[in-house]
Image (cartoon, rainbow, N blue to C red):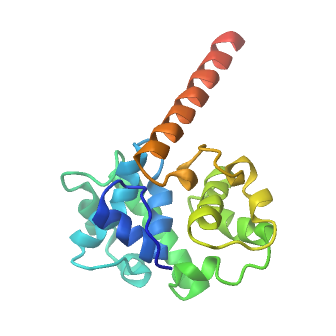
Amino acid sequence: MDVTLHLAQDPEADALLGRSPLAALTGMLLDQQVPMEWAFKGPATIAQRLGADDLDAHEIAAYDPEAFAALLSDKPAVHRYPGSMAKRIQQLCQYLVEHHGGDAEGVWRDAATGQELLKRLTGLPGFGKQKAQIFLALLGKQLGVQPEGWREAAGAYGEPRSFRSVADITGPESLTKVRAHKQEMKAAAKAAKASGE
């Protein structure tokens, strides 16, 4: 895995996401309740604070939980909820160590079908169906991981140039389109909730 991603809109952070399967998974895990760029810059910030060029699942899994939470809480914080996200990242890394020998790419390397890959992704701590489908779409669209039926397994996120998620962000212009789609979805949900009350 060595591609150029543009999710953090920061060259150093994006380079790490493109070469490190664990960084990409961690960025996806962080992508909730914060701007996308902030979430995907998180892995580079964590690696820098650990004094490393990459993230290591074994190291993070074994890290003292309080010290790891403090590492994510340092200013600027890695996430709006650094304590709970530190716990989730450690759970993800512990799962990867236990089930894949610490190799994040092992989650998708030999998946024969899109459905199998979706099942593996939804099995990861912190990955519900929607997050798993978005990550599956990212793998297929930008990282060349395309088992049979991957687009179908990714649902609407797998559609070409759908601009629904980070899977379609390739630069500032597509980021603007994805952000606009997300705002439309929020407005529609808010309107539906208001009319149902």
Left or right for 9, reference 174 = left
Residue at the location (70% across, 84% down)? Answer: 110
x and y percentages locating residue 5 in the rendered image: 44, 63
Single out the residue that lies furthest toward the left: 75
Quarter holding residue 71: bottom left
x and y percentages locating residue 4 in the rendered image: 43, 68
Residue at the location (20% across, 56% down)? Answer: 74
Left or right for 29, reference 85 = right
Quarter holding residue 131: bottom right
Above/below status of 47 relative to 167? below
Above/below status of 61 relative to 46? below
Quarter holding residue 134: bottom right
Residue at the location (56% across, 80% down)? Answer: 105
Left or right for 146, reference 53 = right
Viewer-nearest residue: 194 or 63: 194
Q: Quadrant of the C terminus?
A: top right
How many numbered marks does the figure carry?
Answer: 0
Residue at the location (75% across, 51% down)? Answer: 155
x and y percentages locating residue 159 in the rendered image: 72, 51
x and y percentages locating residue 132 in the rendered image: 64, 59
Viewer-nearest residue: 86 or 55: 55
